[in-house]
Amino acid sequence: ILLAETQGAPWLGQYDTLIIDEAHERSLNIDFLLGYLRQILPRRPDLKIIVTSATIDADRFAQHFAGARGPAPVITVSGRLFPVEQRWRPFEERRDFDLDDAIADAVDELWHDGPGDILVFLPGEREIRETADHLRKHLAQVSRGGPQAEILPLFARLSQAEQDRVFESGNGRRIVLATNVAETSLTVPGIRYVVDSGLARVKRYSYRNKVEQLQIEAVSQAAANQRAGRCGRVSNGVCIRL
C-alpha cells in the first residue's frame, strides 16, 4: 500500500512517521521500500523512520540509514526470553529416509527431554499433511505410555475452528506442524521445543515465465533465529535444526 502511494505522493508528505516491522524477512517489498526511504530522507529531514525486528542486524541497518550525523541510532529493548539450546541434526536424504523420518527422529529425541509441546516448521500445506500422516503412524507404532500426542496442523487454508485448536491446551502433549506463519505472525502457547526443517515457501517472480511462483528455499539465519526463539518464551527450550 505504501509503495502504491509513492506514485501519487513521491515524498510521502502525508506521513511524519513510518514503522517498518519485521524487516528481517527481507521480502522484495520491504527491500525496495527501505531503499526508497533512504533516497527520500535528504528531502524529508522531518520524516521519522523506525525499523523493528527481533533478529535484525542492527549495525548494518544503522549504517544503511547513516546521515550527516553518522549512523542511525539503535534502540535495544530486551525481551523476556529463556535460553534455547540449539542442536544440529543434518541428515542425508535417501530412498528409505527422508525429511519425515528426520522429523520423527527429532520428536523421539525431544520426547525424553521433559514435558512441553513441540512446534515443527515446514514449508507448506502439502509437507504438513504428509508429515502429520507420517507422525501419526510413527507414534502409533512407538508405545510411550500415557495419552497419545495430538498432531495439530497450522496453515492458512484451514478453517478458523481448525486454526483455533492450536491455541487450546489439552491434557496430552501437542505437536504443532506450521508454516512460517508461526515464525512472527502469531505465538503458539506452551511451546518448549522447536524442530526446524530450515525451509520455507517464498514467493518469487520468474522473469522467464512472467509469473510469480512459490518456491521452497532455505530460510535466512535471521529467520532461523526467529524460529528458535519460539521455544524460549515459557521456559528453557530446545531447537533441533535439520
Image (cartoon, rainbow, N blue to C red):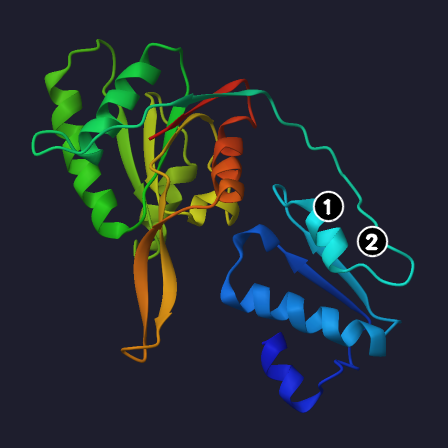
Residue 174 vertical position relative to residue 121 in the rendered view, above or below: above
Residue 13 vertical position relative to residue 117 in the rendered view, above or below: below
Mark 1 is on which residue type? Asp
Residue at the extreme left: 95
Toward the viewer: 77 or 40? 40
Residue 237 vertical position relative to residue 46 in the rendered view, above or below: above
Toward the viewer: 208 or 124? 208
Q: Residue at 58% across / 64% down in the picture?
A: 31
Q: Is residue 64 left or right of residue 179?
A: right
* Residue position marked by numbered label 1 in the rendering: 59
* Residue position marked by numbered label 2 in the rendering: 71
Label 2, secondary structure: give it.
loop
Toward the viewer: 127 or 33? 33
Mark 2 is on which residue type? Pro
Label 2 near label 1: C-beta < 8 Å?
A: yes
Question: Residue 173, how many percent across, how many down?
Answer: 34, 22
Label 1, secondary structure: give it.
helix
User: Residue 143's quadrant in the figure?
Assistant: top left
Badge 1 local density, few (<14 within 10 Å), some, or many (20+)?
few
